[in-house]
């Protein structure tokens, strides 16, 4: 029984789970006995949680849907992590009981004792994501052969870092060469690349996927939003936003929505995907400021004023009506600056517990996408062909000159010619423009550069 | 002593420059105010809450050594006793800080704190403030201050008055000050730190701000009254955490004052839009209480905080479109202030305590050790104002006119929790988890897509150009 339909297509009343599944199956032309196959690609924290949420919600309808996740084989779990994992298991009665019941417990005892090497894919079958050991998930069907995982998938969820997206989806396209039906792809990736030839422009993960696989853009969507994966799995209330074509975004929003996971929908795929990457840039700086000032709320607010004014300035280059991003961009920025992998990374750098030479993939945390995004945005916005009028000096400058925090982060993280402490200098420079002026400038002049997002 | 030399570099935005010495800045302001040699510039803080006390202490630290040119003093009411528990805590603070302990011993001012600790003597807020202890901020000792408890004596010859009162006391105290100033020849400058607002519903619904109260009460022209807003964690500012503030008001005084107030760790921007910034300072305290509730109810969940942030900023943006013709310009400073106010601060703290049951509404909005929680009265003011049918806006879906407050579910929930008291604090979670709630983006689009601006709300008749 379907109750009244509310805004964004949500349904109240009655048990809507099986109905939502049936509706999506119908839209995809699945006949009885033909399973809807949903495949997560990549088992980072968010990719794993996403697959687990779907398994928890729909997995019991065994004859209608199958959810599986692909990750590479061979990643071993080190001794320290195995010891910690053993503690996590033993401190959670429900998890312990489940492993005992499935005859899957003793391998963790052996690993704890150092008598056995565990691998990331085998622990993921029991619901342990290597990037999120403290938050056990439900058991998952894990496939390590990419062809076997994706060849007949109906819906593919891209949980890869953007830096691996192109490579993996190019391989996937070989397996899809003779497919008849076109799959739907949802991308969770937040990183971006900059292409400078023939003209400066941003390349997003969904564009990479479309180029690599030939799947039409209409079937590729981006899911963005605050992304503290463990909190989402623990049923903290969260909002996300699915962006893409009319055909799929509303049905998918409805399908993905759960009591504690609200999914809004939006038609502007490219801009939201890019903004998802932009906020990670500034999250690293926020972590640095937090660590260097001992969590000073006052200094954080100064940083927030400046970094949001830079983000607003950049959005005016990328989209014609950026005010529409104000609400969701702010919420995502707020949580990304407050907590999250990129902010954590900035804190660790500032405390000297990590250094840029260790690279952007950190054990136990996964890929720090903000680093490559700093390089991408800075290089893009440094191009003379994008020059804008300087507000005071009556000359044309590259947009990066008006983004002192972005410049500083580039020199700290990419050029590595400055220390993390220099981020505070960017805030304390008395000659820095009032952040309000940057916003006024952005709003009063025509800055929009359609070519930056590959639009005519 | 001449005026300030031009800075080695060209002066940057907002007219500030590096290189001006402290004494040069003071001399420049004295000259602008027509102070002759031998006539000290008199700066008076009115009200000794945390921010008011810190503000005076910053001035004293920066300029106080120039004794023949400036005098900084602060007024607070006499008679406020320090309770035993606070006296004991204060004693611990003093003994933990060698610099403070040495200073008190040197000034022969230490033993009264021993007596207070032992319960053998009652200390009073004004006497401890002379030693630099603000009752609302005991953990952060300030420099010694000249404290005056007689209001007439404090303000009668003041050149600059700093309003550090809660907005709820502003009208009354400045009404009294107005009587002492009746025969003044020179008009003083008044700088207000107050963030609360009132709503007046007669003859038209409109907001009354503290600066308007001050102008009405004293007759001082608005040109001489300014608002200083910004993230306001007073103890952090005194401890030299880097902070930005914003001084809003008429051209004549705001730039010279911004320059005078600016310090290495306290940057002051200036802005001509006095009323909007003053009102927004009050609006963010409304939502800070809700943020504290959400933080406590979800055990500091960053994810839930972000949902709340998206929804409350979209309501704030919607409300700014009712109040201001081009509100996008608030994005920078409004955001920074909102961010810190939601993260930390008295109003957010209050929301947390309510949600945890450690405080109740019956205790009122003035809390020992914290001061006035301005957000509570602001909830009432904004709610009543935006409930007026005469301000109706078109509902985006129901195709009928509704009062603006119907588009602000968080404000409505806060009103029912804090004012009507018909809902418990955890109802705030229902407001953010309502599946029928609009995507916050839609509220923003609605605000920007239709003409919502109501000039009468800020007391300006339609058609008048903004100054």
Image (cartoon, helix red, strand yellow):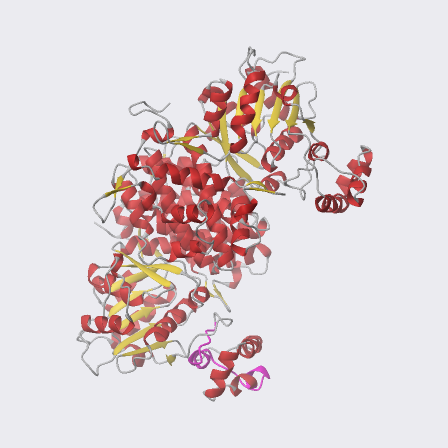
The percent position of residue A157, horizontal first and vertical second, equals: 32, 69
| Between B427 and B234, the one nearer to me in the picture | B427
| Between A39 and A148, the one nearer to me in the picture | A39
Q: Give the side of residue B31 with respect to residue B79, left or right.
A: left
B179 to B62, vertically: above or below: above
Residue A123 is a magenta residue: yes
Res. B150 in view: yes
Q: Give the side of residue B361 with respect to residue A402, left or right.
A: right
B366 to A168, vertically: above or below: above
Q: Magenta span covers which residues?
A: A110-130
- Picture quarter with the N terminus of chain A: bottom left
Q: Give the side of residue A240 with respect to residue A128, left or right.
A: left
The percent position of residue B272, horizontal first and vertical second, equals: 42, 27
Q: Quadrant of residue A444?
A: top left
The percent position of residue B315, horizontal first and vertical second, equals: 37, 45
B432 to B368, vertically: above or below: below
């Amino acid at each position: 029984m379907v109750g009244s339909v509310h805004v964004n297509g949500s349904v109240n009343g009655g048990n809507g789970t099986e109905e939502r599944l049936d509706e999506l199956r119908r839209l995809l032309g699945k006949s009885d006995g033909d399973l809807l196959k949903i495949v997560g690609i990549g088992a980072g924290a968010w990719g794993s949680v996403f697959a687990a949420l779907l398994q928890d919600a729909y997995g019991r309808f065994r004859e209608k849907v199958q959810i599986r996740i692909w990750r590479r084989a061979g990643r071993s779990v080190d001794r320290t992590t195995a010891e910690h994992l053993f503690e996590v298991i033993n401190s959670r009665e429900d998890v312990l009981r489940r492993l005992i019941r499935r005859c899957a417990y003793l391998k963790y005892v052996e690993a704890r004792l150092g008598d056995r090497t565990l691998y990331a894919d085998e622990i993921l079958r029991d619901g342990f994501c290597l990037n999120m050991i403290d938050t056990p998930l439900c058991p998952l069907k894990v496939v390590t052969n990419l062809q076997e995982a994706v060849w007949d998938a109906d819906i593919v969820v891209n949980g890869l870092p953007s830096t691996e997206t192109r490579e993996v989806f190019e391989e996937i396209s070989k397996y899809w060469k003779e497919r008849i039906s076109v799959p739907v792809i949802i991308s969770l990736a937040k990183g971006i690349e900059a292409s400078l030839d023939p003209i400066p422009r941003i390349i997003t993960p969904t564009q990479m996927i479309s180029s690599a696989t030939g799947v039409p853009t209409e079937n590729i969507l981006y899911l963005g939003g605050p992304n503290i994966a463990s909190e989402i799995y623990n049923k903290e209330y969260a909002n996300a936003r699915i962006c893409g074509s009319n055909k799929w975004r509303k049905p998918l929003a409805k399908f993905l929505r759960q009591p504690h996971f609200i999914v809004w929908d939006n038609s502007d795929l490219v801009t939201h995907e890019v903004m998802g990457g932009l906020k990670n840039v500034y999250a690293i700086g926020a972590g640095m400021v937090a660590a260097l000032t001992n969590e000073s709320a006052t200094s954080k607010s100064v940083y927030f004023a400046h970094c949001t004014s830079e983000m607003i300035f950049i959005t005016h280059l990328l989209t014609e009506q950026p005010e529409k991003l104000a609400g969701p961009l702010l919420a995502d920025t707020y949580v990304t600056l407050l907590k999250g992998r990129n902010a954590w990374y900035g804190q660790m750098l500032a405390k000297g517990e990590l250094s840029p030479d260790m690279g952007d993939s950190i054990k136990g945390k996964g890929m720090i996408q903000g680093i490559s995004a700093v390089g991408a945005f800075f290089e893009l916005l440094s191009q003379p062909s994008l020059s804008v009028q300087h507000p005071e000096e009556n000359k044309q400058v590259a947009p990066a000159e008006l983004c002192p925090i972005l410049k500083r982060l580039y020199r700290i993280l990419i050029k590595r010619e400055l220390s993390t402490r220099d981020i505070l200098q960017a805030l304390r420079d008395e000659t820095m423009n009032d952040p309000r002026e940057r916003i006024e400038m952005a709003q009063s002049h025509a800055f929009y550069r359609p070519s930056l997002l590959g639009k005519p | 002593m001449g005026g300030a030399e031009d800075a080695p570099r060209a002066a940057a935005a907002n007219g500030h420059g590096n290189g001006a010495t402290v004494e040069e800045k003071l001399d420049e302001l004295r000259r602008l105010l027509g102070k002759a040699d031998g006539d000290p510039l008199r700066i008076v803080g009115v009200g000794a809450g945390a921010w008011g006390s810190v503000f005076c202490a910053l001035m004293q630290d920066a300029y106080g050594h120039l004794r023949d040119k400036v005098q900084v003093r602060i007024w607070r009411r006499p008679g406020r006793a320090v309770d035993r528990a606070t006296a004991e805590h204060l004693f611990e603070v003093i003994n933990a800080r060698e610099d403070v302990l040495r200073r008190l011993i040197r000034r022969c001012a230490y033993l009264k704190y021993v007596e207070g600790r032992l319960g053998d003597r009652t200390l009073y807020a004004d006497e401890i403030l002379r030693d630099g202890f603000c009752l609302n901020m005991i953990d952060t000792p300030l420099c010694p201050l000249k404290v005056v408890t007689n209001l007439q004596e404090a303000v009668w010859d003041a050149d600059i008055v700093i309003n550090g009162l809660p907005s709820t006391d502003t009208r009354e105290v400045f009404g009294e000050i107005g009587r002492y100033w009746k025969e003044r020849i020179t008009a003083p400058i008044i700088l207000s730190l107050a963030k609360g607002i009132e709503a007046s519903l007669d003859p038209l619904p409109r907001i009354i701000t503290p600066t308007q109260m001050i102008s009405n009460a004293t007759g001082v022209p608005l040109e001489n009254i300014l608002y200083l807003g910004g993230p306001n964690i007073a103890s952090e500012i005194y401890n030299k955490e880097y902070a930005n503030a914003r001084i809003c008001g008429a051209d004549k005084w705001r730039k010279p004052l911004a320059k005078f107030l600016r310090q290495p760790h306290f940057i002051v921007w200036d802005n001509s839009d006095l009323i909007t910034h003053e009102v927004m300072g009050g609006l963010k305290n409304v939502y800070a209480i809700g943020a504290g509730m959400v933080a406590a109810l979800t055990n500091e969940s960053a994810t839930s905080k972000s949902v709340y942030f998206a929804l409350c900023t979209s309501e704030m943006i919607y409300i700014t479109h009712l109040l201001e013709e081009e509100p996008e310009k608030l994005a920078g400073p409004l955001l920074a202030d909102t961010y810190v106010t939601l993260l930390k601060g008295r109003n957010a703290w209050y929301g947390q305590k309510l949600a945890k049951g450690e405080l109740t509404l019956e205790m009122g909005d003035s809390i020992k050790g914290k001061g006035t929680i301005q957000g509570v009265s602001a909830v009432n003011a904004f709610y009543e104002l935006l409930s007026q049918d005469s301000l109706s806006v078109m509902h985006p879906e129901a195709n009928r006119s509704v009062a603006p407050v119907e588009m602000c579910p968080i404000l409505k929930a806060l009103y029912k929790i804090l004012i009507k008291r018909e809902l418990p604090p955890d109802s705030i979670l229902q407001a953010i988890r309502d599946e029928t709630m609009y995507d916050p983006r839609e509220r923003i689009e609605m605000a920007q897509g239709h003409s919502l601006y109501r000039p009468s709300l800020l007391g300006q008749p339609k058609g008048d150009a903004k100054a």
